[in-house]
Image: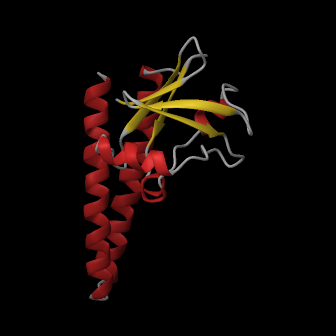
């Protein structure tokens, strides 16, 4: 079930990109009616995406040992991992030093920053590249018995 939801969410993300390009083209031509219609459509897609993301998080509910993060275009462009869901559930705290296991092999010591991100970016960029992670993908963070947080694409 979660694979199908992720596939739909990825399709919505692709449609959002296509609509953004069409909005730019219409704006370039000063076709404001088309811009308005496409903007309304983009808003509706975003709302549907939000509902599906919430449903997905119910399928993979956070526990005291895991949480799920959607990779945003901003996170991808700036090579950061969000810690916000872990902070909201009190699994992670600002200033906490953690060991992330990115994928199957890369262990990274990092710190939780106050704005809901992990400090390390260099290794995150490598992880995104190596595992072909794109905006709209979902990552599962799972803590093991030794306190290491394993990060995997789902």
Question: Left or right: 133 with respect to 122?
Answer: left
Seen at 42% across and 53% down, the residue is 76
Above or below, comparing residue 76 to residue 101 in the picture? below
Figure quadrant of the N terminus? top left
Total numbered labels placed on residues in the image: 0
Question: Left or right: 55 with respect to 86?
Answer: left
Residue furthest to the top in view is: 145
Front-lying residue, 54 or 146? 146
Residue 66, given in percent of the width and then of the height, sits at 53, 21
Question: Left or right: 140 with respect to 120?
Answer: left
Seen at 31% across and 73% down, the residue is 23
Front-lying residue, 86 or 29? 86
Figure quadrant of the C terminus? top left
Above or below, comparing residue 56 to residue 35 in the picture? above
Query: In this rendering, does residue 48 appear at all?
Result: no
Seen at 25% across and 46% down, the residue is 11
Instruction: Name the quadrant containing residue 2.
Output: top left
Residue 127, given in percent of the width and then of the height, sits at 39, 42
Q: How is the image coloured?
A: secondary structure
Above or below, comparing residue 55 to residue 31 in the picture? above
Query: In this rendering, does residue 19 appear at all?
Result: yes
Residue 118, given in percent of the width and then of the height, sits at 60, 43
Above or below, comparing residue 21 to residue 121 in the picture? below
Residue 133, given in percent of the width and then of the height, sits at 33, 44
Seen at 26% across and 72% down, the residue is 22
């Amino acid at each position: 079930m979660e694979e199908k939801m992720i596939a739909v969410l990825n399709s919505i993300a692709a449609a959002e990109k296509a609509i953004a390009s069409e909005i730019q083209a219409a704006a370039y031509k000063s076709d404001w009616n088309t811009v308005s219609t496409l903007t309304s459509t983009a808003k509706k897609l975003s709302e549907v995406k939000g509902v599906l993301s919430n449903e997905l998080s119910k399928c993979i509910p956070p526990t005291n040992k895991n949480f799920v993060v959607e990779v945003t275009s901003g996170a991808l462009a700036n090579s950061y991992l969000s810690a916000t869901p872990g902070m909201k559930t009190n699994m992670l705290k600002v200033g906490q030093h953690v060991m992330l296991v990115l994928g199957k092999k890369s262990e990274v010591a990092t710190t939780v920053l106050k704005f809901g991100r992990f400090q390390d970016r260099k290794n995150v960029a490598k992880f995104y590249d190596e595992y072909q992670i794109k905006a709209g993908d979902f990552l599962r963070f799972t803590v093991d018995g030794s306190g290491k947080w394993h990060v995997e694409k789902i």
